[in-house]
Amino acid sequence: MDISVIITTYNWPEALALSLKSVLAQKQLPLEVIVADDGSTSETAEMIRSIAANAPIPVIHSWQEDKGFRLARSRNRAIARARGEYVILIDGDIIAERHFVHDHHRFARKGFFVQGTRVLLTKRLSQQILRTGELSANCCSAGVGNRKNCLRSDLLANIFSFKSRRLPGIKTCNFAFWRQDAIRVNGFNEDFVGWGREDSEFTVRLMNIGLRRQNVKFNALAYHLYHSKSDRRHLSANDKILKHSIQKKLSWCENGLEQHLLSTQRKVHNCGVNRTGEPGR
């Protein structure tokens, strides 16, 4: 099964570098890793080029102009460019344990999307990790929250992972789905501007086409670097979009992935895409 890992980012190259390196050090490498960049400056692009030059798999930089928080659009553009049949989403402040892709592969099933867990790291520990470039955290470390999420065990994963049709608790910082399922619902809804709810609304539409949620415990471990809370000024408007999709049982959004699929097909046909993906931007 070909897997594309998509990492979202915006102007935090130090954290993104650790996230990228954790994916490139996986026991089971994905087909490619795509950085969904919501308008970072050239510092991020230069860092990605440096890592891509020696990477064992393609590292693609999918960049869009900075016009405010447009995570839904950024993710759609990355999904459109993905070559894998299965997509794993993480944020650029997530460091993946070395079995992360392997574990997601193990739990991938048709008819399901996957919600993983995360380990919350304190500000002090996160600063230490960013300074040293090494993830030196385990369930006994100071500065580690929700410690049970540090434990990796196939036995415990088989016992405690569960299937669900519930929406609460959706977090796309550790999330996976079949690319074709994203196409069926037209991806993320780009009417969402500003932080919040675009992940829940995407999930609502996946469930409305009959998919179920697979919660994975004690596998696919992800360590979340501390950062201050995002600006929530648009949350009220985004809540209304989510509520509308729930009430109307929507499975399709008008302003979504389709436009980028068509655009990507034209660009690939006209000029091709190199290892870093820059000519296709």
Image (spheres, rainbow, N blue to C red):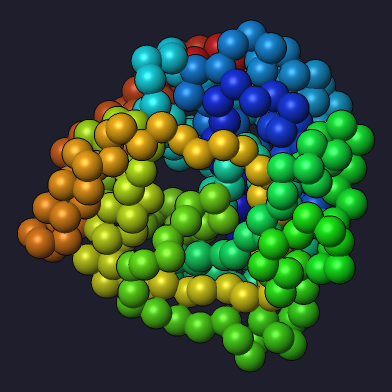
Q: Give the farthest residue toward the bottom.
A: 159
Q: Is residue 200 visible?
A: yes
- Please state if 214 lies on the left or on the right of 201 as rendered: right
The residue that appears at 50% across and 65% down in the rendered structure is: 115
Residue 247 at x, y = what percent? 10, 61
Q: Is residue 56 visible?
A: no
The residue that appears at 35% across and 23% down in the rendered structure is: 263
- Please state if 148 lies on the left or on the right of 68 as rendered: right
> Which is nearer the eye, 202 or 102?
202
Residue 69 lies, with reference to residue 23, above or below; the image says above
Q: Quadrant of the N terminus?
A: bottom right
The residue that appears at 58% across and 73% down in the rendered structure is: 216
> Which is nearer the eye, 237 or 212?
237
Residue 3 at x, y = what percent? 61, 52
Q: Give the farthest residue toward the left.
A: 248
- Please state if 53 lies on the left or on the right of 185 as rendered: right
The image quarter in which residue 131 lies: top right
> Which is nearer the eye, 198 or 89?
198
Residue 215 lies, with reference to residue 68, above or below; the image says below
Residue 131 lies, with reference to residue 101, above or below; the image says above
The residue that appears at 22% across and 34% down in the rendered structure is: 191
Residue 279 at x, y = what percent? 56, 12
The image quarter in which residue 165 lies: bottom left
Question: How many labels, in total?
Answer: 0
Residue 243 lies, with reference to residue 272, above or below; the image says below
> Which is nearer the eye, 107 or 135?
135
Residue 239 at x, y = what percent? 22, 48
The image quarter in which residue 79 lies: top left
